[in-house]
Structure formats: C-alpha cells, structure tokens
Amino acid sequence: MNGLKIVRSSERYVESYCETFDEVAREGRFLSISQGYPVEEMIRFIKTCRQCGYPQFLLIDPEGRAAGWCDIVRRCGEPDDVGFLGVGIAAKYRGMGWGSRLMSAAIKDAKKRGFNEIRLEVRASNYNAIRTYSRLGFVRIAYKSEGVVTDGVAEDIWVMSLYSREISHEGFDGDDFFGIFPNTGFRFKKQR
Ligand SMILES: CC(C)(COP(=O)(O)OP(=O)(O)OC[C@H]1O[C@@H](n2cnc3c(N)ncnc32)[C@H](O)[C@@H]1OP(=O)(O)O)[C@@H](O)C(=O)NCCC(=O)NCCS
C-alpha cells in the first residue's frame, strides 16, 4: 500500500531509523526521551536484537527510509517470557494502519520466539496509542503516577499487557487488584 513495506530491521537502515526516532522523540509528547540515539548506539541495539532473538521490524517508505519501528525486548529482572514493546511512526504516516501492522508483525514473531506476554508503557495522555493498543488486544493493567519524567516534566503512565496464555498470579488482593507484580512495584488491575 502506497509503496510502504514492513521489513526486519538491519543496519542498512540505521541512519534513517535514527533520524525518524529522533524526530518522534523531539515531538516530546510520546517517548520517554526527548532526543534520539547516535548511530553507533543504534547499530549496537540492532545487533543485540538480532543476537538475542528480539523481534525488531521497520516501516520502509518509498524512498527506502525507515519511517517507523517496533521492537520487543527483554528487560533485566523480568521473566524471560515477558517482552517490552516500543513503537513509533513518522508523523506523516500515522493513522493509516501502519503502526498496527508493524506491531502485529512483531507480536506474531514474539509468540514464535517464546514470549508469552507483551507489555508496554504509555503516557496517559497518548490517547491514539492507547486506542491502537487496545484494538490489538492490550489491556490496561497498572497506572503509575508520574511514571515518566522527561526533561524534568513528569507524566502519569499506563502499563498495558497482552497475554498469549493464562498466567497465574499470586498475592491476590481483593476484587480489583492482583497485588504487587514481581519486580515492578506496580499494583496490577484485575483483568476481566
Ligand atoms: C501510536 C502509533 C504507533 C500508532 O500507529 P499508527 O500507524 O498511527 O496507528 P494506526 O493507524 O494503526 O491506528 C491509529 C488510530 O488512531 C487514529 N488516528 C487518526 N489520526 C491519527 C494521527 N494523526 N496519529 C495517530 N493516530 C491517528 C487512527 O484512525 C486509528 O484509530 P481508529 O482505527 O480507531 O480510527 C503512532 O501513532 C505513533 O507513532 N505515535 C507517536 C509515537 C508514539 O506515541 N509511540 C508510542 C509510545 S508508547
């Protein structure tokens, strides 16, 4: 559609990937950082994703530039089958279904690679993203006041989760909350 395509990430796109990431970061309303990474650091990240088997996909525009990204990575201290999703699309290609397609590709790949839960953090004010995640099946499981601080400005965040299997939770605590989820300190809302 429109000459855009989704591909697995590779170093050949690193410069435009860095530029697009930087543009989205500088919008200041979406990511947890307000500027992008240097090329060398991004190359390291792409290599890490490949070596560790983390899903990482790019949206390529008709000029062959990376106009969006989605990755799912493990985090230290979290269970091995939980992946954390990051996503962004250049402003001119938003609202056309590409973000959903990019995430679907990464999630499908993550399931093949043994991830049973995909989690993400999103600013409470990022309604477009929250709606897009919800449509893909993510549910809001925790709310953290001032969960992100960017350039000294704090904002509340939602933690959202997509399960591919039932997970048994310990520490059930009343009707509304499961209790404290390991390693996060978050109170997790009961899923219905
Ligand atoms: C969140 C994001 C990845 C979603 O990707 P996308 O390609 O815009 O998403 P889709 O087109 O698949 O779906 C977006 C929804 O928002 C609507 N939308 C309309 N205009 C939009 C716009 N300018 N920007 C974003 N979403 C828009 C779409 O219509 C769709 O909702 P609907 O199906 O209920 O109508 C993308 O908007 C983005 O990169 N935003 C900035 C960075 C960001 O927020 N990253 C996530 C941080 S947690």
Image: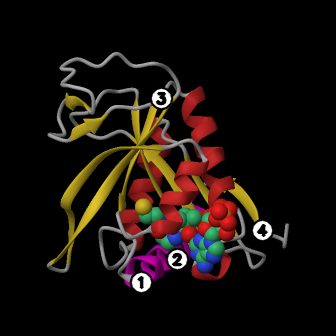
Q: Mark 2: which secondary structure?
A: helix
| Residue 88 in sight from this viewpoint | no
Give the residue pinned by disc 4: 4
Side (left or right) of 157 relative to 60 = left
Residue 29, compared with residue 115, is above or below; it is below
| Earlier residue among tags 4 and 2 | 4
Q: Residues within 10 Å of mark 1 (few under 14, many from 20)?
A: few
Q: Position of residue 150 (x, y in %)?
A: 22, 74
| Earlier residue among tags 1 and 3 | 1
Location of residue 190 by image quarter: top left
| Earlier residue among tags 2 and 3 | 2
Residue name at image x 22 percent, y 54 percent: 144
Give the residue pinned by disc 3: 115
Number of the front mark, 2 or 3: 3
In the image, farthest residue toward the front: 175
Side (left or right) of 189 relative to 60 = left
Magenta region includes residue 23: yes
On residue 20, which mark appears?
2
| CB atoms of marks 2 and 3 within 8 Å | no
Q: Position of residue 176 (x, y in %)?
A: 27, 33
Q: Which residues are the magenta region?
A: 10-27
| Residue 30 in sight from this viewpoint | yes
Question: Which secondary structure type mostly characterizes the magenta part of the structure?
Answer: helix
Ligand 1 found in image quarter: bottom right
Q: Position of residue 189 (x, y in %)?
A: 30, 37
On residue 156, which mark appears?
none
Give the residue pinned by disc 1: 27
* Amino acid type at image mark 3: Phe
Q: CA distance from mark 3 to mark 4?
A: 28 Å
